Image (cartoon, rainbow, N blue to C red):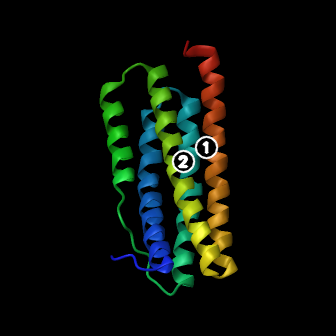
Amino acid sequence: MTIETKRDMFERELQKLYHAELEILDLHGDLSMAAGSQAISEIFASHQDDTVTQIHRIESVFERLGQEPTERGSAIMEGLLAEKDEFINEVEDDELRDLDVLSVGMINERLELTLLDRLLLLAADLDLPEEIGHALGTNRTEAANALQQMQSVLETTQSSSWQ
């Protein structure tokens, strides 16, 4: 895909976001299973339904644009998945596993926020329909909330046990 216009860039980023969200479904399941504590496991298990809803919103954006939902891989997302695989195979201590699980989860949410910020800027610049901005904005709010939840847990846990 050659990027020649802002619309081309919007479509590319939407495809990358769609791919990332589909990968996140598996990622959250893996992180939930890899967590060393039930509390951390539940954070990721509870985000599964949110991710499905976010995927449906992205599909509605494709539909609004008159396109079939299409994925485009991202080296960044692939690197994040590789990082997850590496720590799952190497870290045995439960507290350290929780630290890694939260770290990978937070990196994921930051990636998602970056993609959504770029899409929202392009959507506004392209004067796309309000429904598209609303769908992407809702996903952004949910990603920001998820990141804040993980940061809060990390800060609370870090101050009490990772010293």
Quadrant assignment, res 134: bottom right
Q: Earlier in the sequence, mark 2 or mark 1?
A: 2
Camera-nearest label, 2 or 1:
2
Residue hosting label 1? 147
Tell me the SS state at disc 2.
helix
The residue under the point 67% across, 56% down is 141
The extreme top residue here reads: 163
Drawn side of residue 158 relative to residue 90, left or right: right
Q: Position of residue 139 (x, y in %)?
A: 62, 61
56, 14: nearer the viewer: 14
The residue under the point 35% across, 39% down is 83
- Please tell me whether residue 67 is drawn above or below residue 159 in the rendered image: below
Q: Position of residue 105 (x, y in %)?
A: 50, 41
Pick the quarter of the image with the N terminus: bottom left
Q: Position of residue 155 (x, y in %)?
A: 64, 26
Pick the quarter of the image with the C terminus: top right
User: What is the spatial separation of the Cα atoms under label 2 and label 1, in whole angstroms?
Assistant: 7 Å
Quadrant assignment, res 56: bottom right
Amino acid type assigned to the residue bearing label 2 in the image: Arg
The extreme front residue here reads: 4
Residue hosting label 2? 110
Q: Exactly how many numbered labels are in the figure?
A: 2
Q: Residues within 10 Å of mark 2 (few under 14, many from 20)?
A: some
- Please tell me whether residue 148 is drawn above or below residue 111 in the rendered image: above
Q: Position of residue 147 (x, y in %)?
A: 61, 43
The residue under the point 46% across, 67% down is 13
The residue under the point 45% across, 30% down is 100
Residues at marks 2 and 1 touching, judged by CB atoms closer than 8 Å = yes
